[in-house]
Amino acid sequence: MNFSNDAAAARLISRREAIQRAALLLGVTISPSILAGVLQAQPAGGKGAKPTFLSTAQFDAVGAMAERIIPRTDTPGAIDVGVPAFIDLMYGRYLAADEQRMFAAGLAEIDAKCRATTKGGFSQMEPAMQDSVLKGVADASKDKEKSFFHQLRELTLLGYFTSEPVGKNVTHYDPIPGPFQACIPLASVGNVAWTR
């Protein structure tokens, strides 16, 4: 048994573990179905994307909600990087049936509240009113382990931070970190040869 090889292998992490660690840093709990989807899906989308699984009204509401969670500032907003298309794909292909029901019920509940007060859906409301509605939904879900708001927040953050535009332009992902240094002593990199 080569102990140094086992120690090196223990330091390597899988993509699944990397996403779980990123979620932990973001304060998000990832359900198994969403984790499976994140590992396989990142649709191209942005402004002008069309829904595949959600209705047009649901898709517009999801887009407006995601944009209130991550609005455009000096960095792109949720809509700019295709978060609504990501949520649509996750909803239709990767959420379990009970998660789909919870998500659809949450959208329907918010839509009913919005139509009762403004005669329009969430996406037609002014941003200040949208923020008020989302704050109310967030406050109502504080003591729950899993709720519509938890799903929405989780999907929005994952869709945003796993998108190519954010990886390239916001988090500045560098697949090969650090400068290239040829012919350096093995001891200076922890006595581990990475090219085995």
Image: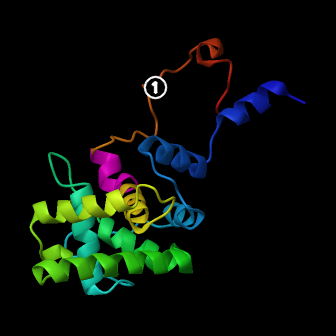
Label 1 packing within 10 angstroms: few (<14), some (14-19), many (20+): few
Residue under label 1, please give it. 180
Instruction: Please provide percent x and percent y for residue 1.
Output: 90, 30
Tell me the magenta residue range: 160-169
Instruction: Give the quadrant of the C terminus.
Output: top right
Q: Residue at x 55, y 61 (%)?
A: 31
**Residue 54 at x, y percent in the picture:** 35, 83
Q: Main secondary structure of the magenta part?
A: helix
- Horizontally, residue 138 falls left or right of residue 147, namely left
Residue 80 visible in this rendered orientation of the protein: no
Decide if residue 173 is on the left or right side of residue 2. left
Badge 1 amino acid: Phe
**Callout 1: SS:** loop
Q: Please tell me whether residue 184 is drawn above or below residue 144 in the rendered image.
A: above
Give the camera-side residue of 43 and 138.
138
As drawn, 110 above or below 5: below
User: Does 94 appear in magenta?
Assistant: no
- Out of 169 and 97, give the one closest to the viewer: 97
